[in-house]
Image (spheres, rainbow, N blue to C red):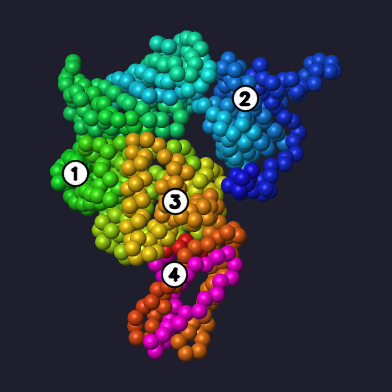
Amino acid sequence: PDPIEKQQIERFYRSDSVVVDFDRVYIAFPWNSDFIQSIPKEGPDVDPSYRVKTLLKKMRSLPDKEFNYNLGFHLYRAAVDNRREYIWLDILKDDYQHTVYSYDPYSEEQVTLYKYTSNFKVPQLVSSTADSLKLPGAEFPVGFDNYEYNIDVDISTTAKSKITCTIFSRVECDSLKHLVFILPREYKVDTVWDDAVDFIKNKDRPELMLELNRFYHRGDRIKISVQYRTNLFHHYMQHGVVQSDLTHWYPAAGFRQLSDYTVRFSIDKGYDFICVGDKVQDTTIDGRQVMTYKTPRPVAYITFNYGKFETVEIDDTPVPINIEYYNGVAGSPIFGSPALNRVTEDISGAFRFYNDNFGPYPFDHLDVAAMAVGFGQGSAGVVHLSEVTFQRSEKGLDDKFRAHEVAHQWWGHLVNPAGYHDIWLSEGLAEYSAALYVQLGRDDESTFRKILKEWRKRIVQSGRMHGKKSVGYKAGAIFLGNRLASELSPGDFETIIYYKAAYLLHMLRFEMELEETNKNAFIEMLAGYADCYAGGKASTADFIDIAKPYLGDRTEVFFDQWLYDWRIPRIKKKTKKGRDDSYELFITVNEVGDRFETPYPVMFEMSDGSVDTIVYWIKSGENHFLYQAGSGLAVKSVEFNQNFDILER
């Protein structure tokens, strides 16, 4: 495996390769698989014993019971679609130690390895890679692209809502007879029609599997319609209704596929409503309010908010901004919104800062709404904010949180991450953009440095992250993306994808702007990145290509050590006062790769109170430098990396 996968294998197996003893192996493959040709045909047929049949039944139930995966359907699908290389292996030791290997030709990363033992609640993804044995340039089609949705939502606030969803798809593979969508397990599907003739939707599995009326081929168009019911909302005393799922309330497939949406809502009168897209209809039919929203451009997903709000209108920004909040009990610090003015200030301030520096906002309005949840969600033209941030305003926390969610309008919706490996380009960029707003937009250098210090603390130490186990940087490289949320340390998705990725961006900025003439290079680069990939998707490789003209020959080394490597340097510093006005520095860099190199600031305080900051280039191993004060001055003190510009342990 490559170094990233190797580190994950070492975490799970405490070895650099997966070599496991086993008692039995269960192998499943399509009936037309080439694998069957490798099975010896000599020898008599035998009738398995009762014990063997019992063991087989137990192993066959694992995909369905523990993976929430309908293996039988996927084997059938692979056989019918002629994806003959599909295979599933469950390697078992002592009845409870499973190593599961699968090759799934429907996935962009076909080869996956799972570990499941009594130490885990659910199977853990250890490794996931593309097939390295494929010929260079070979395609890995995922099957189909959902390019348009028409959704009709009959909302009930107290019972199940009725939803009809019509999806238009374009086939992207040679042969297709089945479609698989993500749909929450508790959703009840009533019927399907148009080009879909049958479906499977089990109540204990978040999958909707459809059979089409014929085989479809690359370039063909498919139209399917699904009708289903579910409770869309939770109910809270002071807020009325809160969505139970912000983004997965309709059938979806693939990673953030960009689609056009037309959504029609029918709701009870007396509620306020916001949704991604432009409102193109608002009328009353049979005593209910009916509204239709249409997205002006393809977006990654649709979300909405529904409740009873008060509204603040901001009209001195490039586009109108509406802030919807809970008025609650007048004067109450619990149920009211005492921090509303600070929310308004940060939303409008961050919006202006991003619009001025990263490029024009991509939509014609922005709706910001409070929600009774403990997190935020930035969607296309809509921002959900935890109601907590309307009740308090802690510097370096709430201001950054609000600005982070606004930043997703650029990093996450103007430019979408291409895959799960690239999620740092959404969350890490939003986190660092929020810190930039604090530093440059609000001119608060002190709070900005406190943010850097807090990020470093989260990254280098083990403990708990919002109640979840964290081992910090040891969890793995930034490039692992969503896989960092494993049971080994579930708190480290946030640690690595938000904080370490943001720190990477700060070090990128620090290195790009070392020369006085390059002081705006980083923001200039981000504006170019936004302009180049506006309205589409960008991968990590795309971002690196944008950064390369600014980093030059340093590009590969920089991203290898901070993005693709999980290690953080341990830097030991010693000083020795020399004769007259000289000072010797001994800097030793440990626990990094052989190619490690970074700029490293050192601040010298002089005998007259003046300060001189020198940036040295340090490499793995021992580094020795001589500083000469001059002008008859003596060095009073030395401080290394005084502003936390370089991430170190």
Q: Is residue 159 above or below residue 471?
A: above
Q: Amino acid at mark 2?
A: Tyr
**Residue 344 in the image: x percent, y percent?**
21, 49
Nearer the camera: disc 3 or disc 1: 3
Decide which of 16, 306 is in the foreground and name it.
16
Magenta extent: 615-644
| Separation of marks 4 and 2 at Cα, in angstroms | 54 Å
Inspect the magenta stretch and tell me whether residue 641 lies in it.
Answer: yes
Gap in Å between the C-alphas at discs 1 and 2?
A: 52 Å
Callout 2 secondary element: loop
Task: Of the two numbered discs 1 and 4 on the same chain, state the one appearing first in sequence.
Answer: 1
Mark carried by residue 318: 1
Whether the magenta-drawn stretch holds residue 394 is answered as: no
Can the viewer see residue 490? no
Q: Position of residue 224 (x, y in %)?
A: 40, 15
Q: Earlier in the sequence, mark 3 or mark 1?
A: 1
Q: Amino acid at mark 4?
A: Val
Q: Nearer the viewer, residue 506 or 239?
A: 506
Spatial CA distance of label 2 from label 3 is 39 Å
Residue, disc 2: 86
Q: What's the CA distance linking mark 3 and mark 4? A: 21 Å
Badge 1 marks a residue whose secondary structure is loop
User: Disc 2 vs disc 3: Cβ atoms closer than 8 Å?
Assistant: no
Upstream in sequence: badge 2 or badge 3: 2
Q: Are marks 4 and 2 in contact (CB under 8 Å)?
A: no
* Location of mark 3 (residue): 548
What residue do we see at 42% from left, 65% from top? 644
Earlier in the chain: of badge 3 and badge 4, it is 3
Which sits earlier in the primary sequence, circle 4 or circle 2? 2
